Image (spheres, helix red, strand yellow):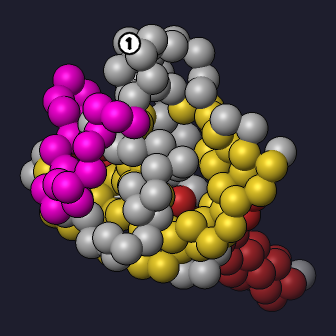
Amino acid sequence: MYIKMERKLSYIKKNSSLVALIGSLITLIGGFFLSYNYIQTKKMIAFDYMNNAIYDGSEIIIETDNPTLNLDNNLPAEVSNDYIGYLSIPKINLKKGFLDLRSSENDVDKNILVVKGSTYPDVDKGNLIIAGHSGTGWKAFFNDLYKLNKNDLVYVSYKDKKYTYKITNIYKQEKTGTVAIYRDYDKTTLTLITCTNFDTKSQTIYISELISVEEE
């Protein structure tokens, strides 16, 4: 009887140790995931802050776009605060309107931003330049641009015409308040600019070349 009780107590101790070990492992795993989620959240907050800081209240300066284009001839006489066209990228389920670059609503904190120095799609050998936020929140319209690759298609609707562009180059630059655009000046192009995902120090530039125009 004594031996049976001893064996039973030994069995209970072993099971208690096993339960304690499993409990410790579960606690460690839970702690790991909590810490990981906390760190990821902090990284995202830091990324959002730096993403906003690079654009908020500051003008994006284009360094190397074609200086020979007369931009004034490309601008309508009256400024519209309504969308004048739409940017569409089916691969990432993006469709967003853009405004006259002089509009008070042409603001990266309200919409995608048509950058000063842009021409509209109907200007031969011109360059439509659009910037947008990445990160989280409702204004992170360009958060999924990182999923794009060379040869992906981007569409712009403007003045009842559909302009189809193909991505030809993707590159990163340090955030300095300026953007160097490397494109073929003999081509009509579209340039998209956003902060690089989970990188507070760089921005990514997507160059696309016009391949077709059709009536909508």
- The residue at 36%/63% (across/down) is 205
Q: Amino acid at mark 1?
A: Ser
Give above or below for 34 relative to 104: below
Q: Quadrant of the C terminus?
A: top right
Judge whether 24 appears above or below 40 on screen: below
> In the picture shown, does residue 9 fall above or below 62?
below
Point out residue 62 in the picture as x, y percentages from the top left corner: 19, 50
Can I make out residue 44 in this image? no
Give, as a single range, the part of the protein colored magenta. 53-74
Left or right: 143 in relation to 13 = left
- Residue 113 visible in this rendered orientation of the protein: yes
Q: Name the one closer to the observer, 126 or 147.
A: 126
Q: Residue at horizontal 23%, vertical 60%?
A: 66
For label 1, the residue is 104
Q: Residues within 10 Å of mark 1 (few under 14, many from 20)?
A: few
Residue 191, magenta (yes or no): no
Q: Nearer the viewer, residue 81 or 70?
A: 70
Quadrant of residue 202 in the image? bottom left
Quarter of the image for residue 163 reads bottom right
